Amino acid sequence: MSNRAEREPAHCGPVGDAEYEEAIDRIRTPLNAALCGKESVVEMVLACLLARGHLLLEDLPGLGKTTLAKSLARSVGGRFSRVQCTPDLMPSDITGFSVFNQKTGEFDFQEGPVFADVLLADEINRSTPRTQSALFEAMAERQVTIDKHCYTLPESFFVIATQNPLDSHGAYPLPEAQLDRFAVKLSLGYPDRASELAMLASDWARTGGAVVVGGGLQPGELVGLQRRASRVAVAARVREYLVDLAAATRTRRDVHLGVSPRAVLIWQRVAQAHALLQHREFVTPDDVQHVALAVLGVRLVGEFSSPEPVIEQILADTPVPLRL
């Protein structure tokens, strides 16, 4: 080991060992087909999804962020919505609004795109902070409150937000409070030569990404997988390790904002999901370390251009439990 770890689906019961492995493959296969050579990224996307988190994709345009989001939405089934974020986008364009019905003399609520199983918020940092905040309640509570009425979102509600680097034209930085709502942040990067050649020869090149690989999940299967991930065992020593790592982020001089208790809970859930993807029923320190960069990279704020060296140093300096 290295020293670096109100709407209910129709069917959401327990998933058996063979069943969950087969169901996960029905998500994994189309994602790997859509993103040639990005297997490690796909595994972290799956961990985020099974952990009931939300995903932030940050990269340059044209590297496959939207392709990944659309492929995932097709794979998990359910309703899919997309919002193209622009500076003139209003909060009601995301959550919905009430319209007066002259026949009934009452206001009728018109659902916004947030009422979906998978919501793609494309280029989220091109929208204003006021509009960005419209997603706060939906991401944290899986519900929205409009005109004093509370509307429940699906239990498996999943936000995939893409953002351009902050030095891009017309980008607004996401506030720390919203960044903490995301479970992980990933970057796709450029494909290697072999993967790019494979992409040019694939069905995706001929159809513009319209090909659907596999049948995907049935309604309720995703919730079953997520509940299975939440039952992966976490030993007391692994929980102590997580707390020690979190404390280390709060005491470094070069870190202005360490991880919150909510972030530690998210970190544990993502580690549980990663363990499940490795066909294990318990979390190891390696799981905690493996997902650390994706989980901490979205929320550490400090005097550094990249959080990666800081995270690596924290993992190296924090003692790893030898026995669970």
Image (spheres, grey):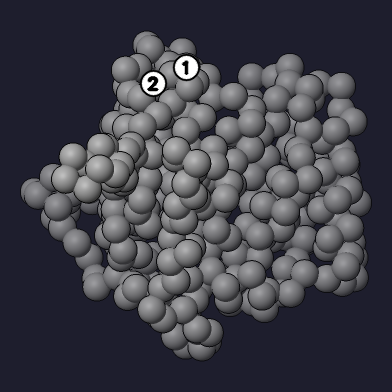
Graded by Cα atoms within 10 Å as few (under 14), some (14 to 19) or many (20 or more), the crowding at tag 2 reads many
Q: Whole-percent x and y of residue 268?
A: 71, 58
Q: Residue at x 54, y 25 (%)?
A: 174
Query: Circle 1 sits in a helix, a strand or a loop, which is it?
Result: loop
What residue is rendered at 63% in x and 37% in y?
A: 180
Q: Is residue 243 left or right of residue 110?
A: right
Dividing the image into 4 quarters, which one contains the C terminus?
A: bottom right
Mark-to-mark CA distance, 1 and 2: 6 Å
Q: Is residue 75 left or right of residue 7?
A: left
> Which image quarter holds the N terminus?
bottom right
Q: Residues within 10 Å of mark 1 (few under 14, many from 20)?
A: many
Of the residues shown, which amino acid type is indicated by label 2?
Arg
- Residue 119 in percent (x, y) is at 36, 47
Question: What residue is shown with label 1?
Answer: 172
Q: Is residue 63 positioned above or below 318 on the image?
A: above
**Mark seen at residue 260:** none
- 141 or 73: which is nearer to us? 141
Question: Mark 1 belongs to which amino acid?
Answer: Tyr
Mark 2 residue element: helix
Instruction: Tell me the residue at 82%/43% (across/down).
Output: 246
Picture residue at 75% right of the left edge, 66% below the top: 284
Residue 82 in which image quadrant: top left
The one of 248 and 83 positioned closer to us in this rendering: 83
Task: State whether residue 202 appears in this view.
Answer: yes
Badge 2 is on which residue?
Answer: 126
Q: Nearer the viewer, residue 140 or 315?
A: 140
* 220 with respect to 129 (left or right): left
* Circles 1 and 2 in contact, beta carbons < 8 Å: yes
